[in-house]
Image (cartoon, helix red, strand yellow):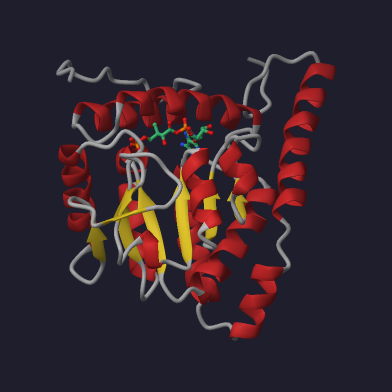
Amino acid sequence: MGSEKMHRIPKDHPRYTSLRIRQRMVSGWRRGLAAPEGLLAHGRGEAFDYLLGERTQPEAAKAIRAAAATLLLARHPVLSVNGNVAALAPDSMAALARSLPSAVLEVNLFHRSEARARRIAARMKRLAGRRVRVLGPSPDARLPGLSSPRARSFKEGMLSADVVLVPLEDGDRTEALRRARKKVVAVDLNPLSRTARTASITIVDNVIRALPELTRQVCALRRRPPSELKRLATRFDNRANLARALGRMLARLRALSERRRALDPAGRRA
Ligand code: PTJ
């Protein structure tokens, strides 16, 4: 793992926020939290975020509300943490876990190594506090229909969950969770990914923005009657919402091309 110092990014750089997020990812990799493949996955996400204008769009806000209602109604919600989440948004994930009375955090890695799982679990435990259960090293179960080691999981984690939140997930595991009849809430900037298309609710947004907003919605909806939460959760149509998210990207591209503007996410001339 590299040990060079991070470059200081000038605050007036037009891509300051994006470059700072990128540094967080690199730092997560240097600390042994994120996999090197996570850096590549992040780059793919950045490209889609660019098309979204690097903002939480109305489709994502709608999905976040349905996701908050679904998590509040869950008997045993499990929040999955991988290397990218541990690098980019561990504090937001910990806050979300604290906001849900029965949520469990499960470290679930695509490129699994016990050492990385231990490091991520320790970080999440530190941030989430004593009240939140964190499952990380030494898995005791397997998700059916997946080949090793991605299948490794926990009896008291995903195996017994009714709702699983998977930020930045791979398509195979999302499909395996759906086959096991679990509701899956995904956060994925790519509306075309298998995860996005297979999940019950897909939030097409950056985890950096989506997770704090999800916690805000959980807190806002907490005292609403279950009938209202059920309505919010069941009326959500993932396919239609994904189509609208794609349509928004298309419309942005069309508007920008018609104005002959280079693609600056904020709509400024680049
Ligand atoms: O830490 P591990 O071993 O569990 O590995 C994590 C990665 C992300 C490497 C692994 O799950 C993986 O390979 O994922 P994929 O199949 O590349 O899918 C990642 C998806 O997340 C892609 O569709 C990206 O567009 C999307 N994405 C990337 N960065 C973000 C994102 N979505 C939301 N927020 C982001 N910041």
Q: Where is residue 169 in the image (x, y as percent from the top left)?
A: 46, 42
Q: Can residue 206 be seen in this view?
A: yes
Q: Is residue 96 visible?
A: no
Establish if 191 lies above or below 202.
Answer: above
Q: Which of the four quarters of the rendered structure image does ligand 1 lie in?
A: top left
Residue 208 falls in which quadrant of the image? top left
Q: Is residue 142 left or right of residue 144?
A: left
Please identify the quadrant where the C terminus is shown. Answer: top right
Of residues 228 and 58, the one drawn nearer to the viewer in this rendering: 228
Establish if 267 lies above or below 60.
Answer: above
Residue drawn where x is 20% and y is 57% of the image:
125
Of residues 242 and 193, the one drawn nearer to the viewer in this rendering: 193
Residue 82 falls in which quadrant of the image? top left
Residue drawn where x is 80% and y is 17% of the image:
257
Q: Where is residue 103 in the image (x, y as percent from the top left)?
A: 36, 68
Q: Is residue 162 left or right of residue 25?
A: right
Q: Where is residue 234 in the image (x, y as percent from the top left)?
A: 69, 69
Residue drawn where x is 50% and y is 40% of the image:
172
